[in-house]
Image: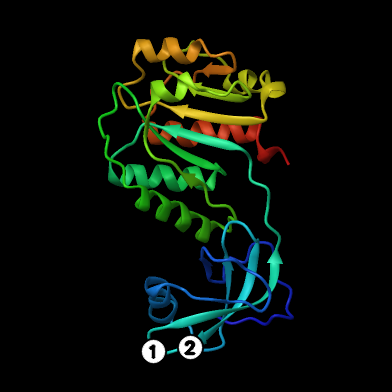
Amino acid sequence: MAFHSGRPVPRYDFDAPRLFIDQPMRAGASLDPDRDQSNYLLNVLRLADGDRILVFNGRDGEWLAGLRLVSRKVAQLDLFEAVRPQETAPDLHYLFAPLKHARLDYMVQKAAECGVSRLVPVLTRRTQNTRVNLERMRANAIEAAEQCGILTVPEVDEPRKLEAILERWPTDRLLIVPDEDAPVQDPLAALSGARERAGRMAVLIGPEGGFDPAERKMFRALPNVLVLSLGPRILRADTAAVAALSLVQASLGDWRG
């Protein structure tokens, strides 16, 4: 799919191929896709010499680039011009007890689509899956950003124990904890009431078996915490993640404009 550097590029051009490349971007520079990316460009998308794509690195905005064929298996990308400036991502961390395989993939993709800036796997007392593939998590976040026109890719942290995180919790970051043990009340009203505290934020989703009583005691004792219910039904962790992040972004985040 080709388009020209002089043609206006819409804010989201879902017909144009998009590729994340973690290299500095400036006009006139050339990017070197890795082997898998070259294979994707040449054999999956079947792009030819001179075709145009959109590229981004999560820092320098989105750029129009032209493919230059180096060999049958190697491509380079020559940058022409910036077509979208880098957007400021909300300072929203997502803390979660790891899930297994496909459900974790789904949850990471949806968190990236919802605009989180950092993914933090936490090991709780009832966490069943303690092994986390960080490279796979990052790949899923990048894929979601490529497909959805997102310019910011969330950082991925090493897994840490929940107790250790809560012991050092910064007082200026609002911790929002959906908890099935909380009284069923209007979550939108609860979030709106915390608007004055909403700057730096984090959402914590527990494991399938829920939080341990000692963990509940720890996060409820924090000075800047909001514990709320997500309704009368118990949600699976990946469903709770989408519901909670949507509520937070709609009430306190960048969905408000």
56 above or below 163?
Answer: below
The picture places residue 135, in percent across and down from the top left corner, at 36, 52
Instruction: Name which residue type carries label 1.
Output: Arg
Residue 92, percent across and down?
A: 58, 36
Residues 257 and 56: in front is 56
27 or 174: nearer the eye?
27
Q: Quadrant of the C terminus?
A: top right
**Residue visible at 58% across and 55% down in the picture:** 150
Residue 84 is at least partly visible in this image: yes
Q: Amino acid at mark 2?
A: Leu
Q: As drawn, is 188 to the left or to the right of 196?
A: left
Q: Secondary structure at mark 1?
A: loop
Query: What is the image's colouring?
Result: rainbow
Number of marks: 2
Residue placed at 65% from the left, 61% from the top? 61
x%, y% of residue 125? 30, 21
The residue located at (66%, 71%) in the rendering is: 26
Whether residue 230 appears in this view of the structure is no
Question: In the depicted view, which residue is nearer to us: 80 or 112?
Answer: 80
Instruction: Classify 40 as above or below 68.
Output: above
Tag 2's secondary structure? strand
Percent position of residue 16, x then y: 57, 71
Q: Quadrant of residue 179?
A: top left
User: Residue at horizontal 49%, vertical 75%?
Assistant: 32
Label 1 sits on residue: 72
- Labels 2 & 1 near each other (Cβ < 8 A): yes
Cα gap from disc 2 to disc 1, whole angstroms? 7 Å
Say whether residue 131 is left or right of residue 53: left
Mark linked to residue 69? 2
* Quarter of the image where one finds residue 45: bottom left
